[in-house]
Amino acid sequence: MPHPVDQKDHPETGRQTEAWFRSLLDTALDGIIVTDERGRILTFNKACESMFGYSAAEMLGKTIDKVMPRGEATHHGDHIDRYIRTGEKRIIGIGRELSARHRDGSEFPIELSIGETRTVSGRQFIGIIRDISTRKETEARLRQLQAEHEHLARISAMNELGAAIAHELNQPLTANLLYVQAAIRQLEKAGIRNSTIVDSLEKAACEAERAGKIMRRMRRFVEKREIKQQRIEILSVLDEA
């Protein structure tokens, strides 16, 4: 990295600047990697050590491929090569999300921003890296909660529809039961002893009454009621199990 003061003319100031710069790198919460045009690592701060599981001593002089999955490393290198050849900025100065690779081989999502600086020894690229694993987990959890909320909303709508249907069907079923019972009484008053007709009407009345009970149970099941809490003896429950 270039220094604002020439260390040859002002060695003490140069050392102070170097110490200040190193302190800045090591206290940064985000990972900072500086590479040359070939992707060789020149700077690897402490946040990167924690993030990737490598020490700075292990990474200096290595290529950036070491902390990137194979596919990501290829694309990243292609973007840098294209930029050097054409000046076309596809990732320089533009933040993007991609995967990184820990020392243990596991991959995790990161947000990467790349800047460029020119030095007497050539171009250098500064990568600011942020581990966004927690953010991605939170986003996934929010999507799950949203899906669950939508599912509950659909269930609530179905409950209301079920209650409405049960209410609408219960009335004609009750009326049908009353008509059948009235027909049986009229047959009895008229002295008609046709057992087949009476038996069929009685069965129809029985089925209508059963359907009415089903509708009433359905209404009780779907209606919103306050949850009642009560104490139980856990030992008795275990004994029954």
Image (cartoon, rainbow, N blue to C red):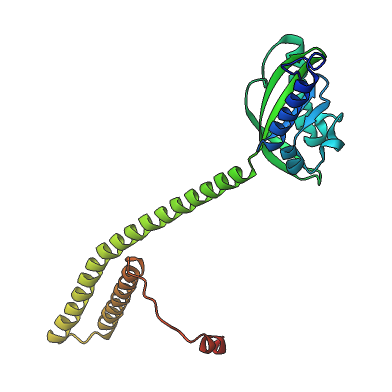
Residue drawn at the location 25% of the way across and 82% of the way down: 198
Q: Quadrant of residue 53?
A: top right
Q: Where is 142 relative to 2, above or below?
A: below
Left or right position of 203 against 236: left
Name of the residue lying farthest toward the top: 86
Q: In which quarter of the view is residue 41 placed?
A: top right
Residue 75 makes an appearance in the image: no
Q: Is residue 134 above or below residue 34?
A: below
Q: What residue is drawn where x is 79% and y is 27%?
A: 74
Towards the viewer: 209 or 186: 209
User: Where does the image place residue 29, in percent across and percent down from the top left?
Assistant: 65, 38
Which quadrant is the C terminus positioned in? bottom right
- Residue 91, image quadrant: top right
Provide residue 157's location: percent of width, then percent of height: 36, 55
- Side of 149 relative to 38 (left or right): left
Closest to the observer, 41 or 135? 41
Quadrant that contains the N terminus: top right
Q: Position of residue 166 (x, y in %)?
A: 30, 65
Q: Total label count?
A: 0
**57 vs 236: above or below:** above
Residue 173: percent from the left, percent from the top? 25, 69
Q: Nearer the viewer, residue 86 or 183?
A: 86
Residue ranking furthest to the left: 189
| Left-right relation of 142 to 186 | right
Q: Is residue 146 visible?
A: yes
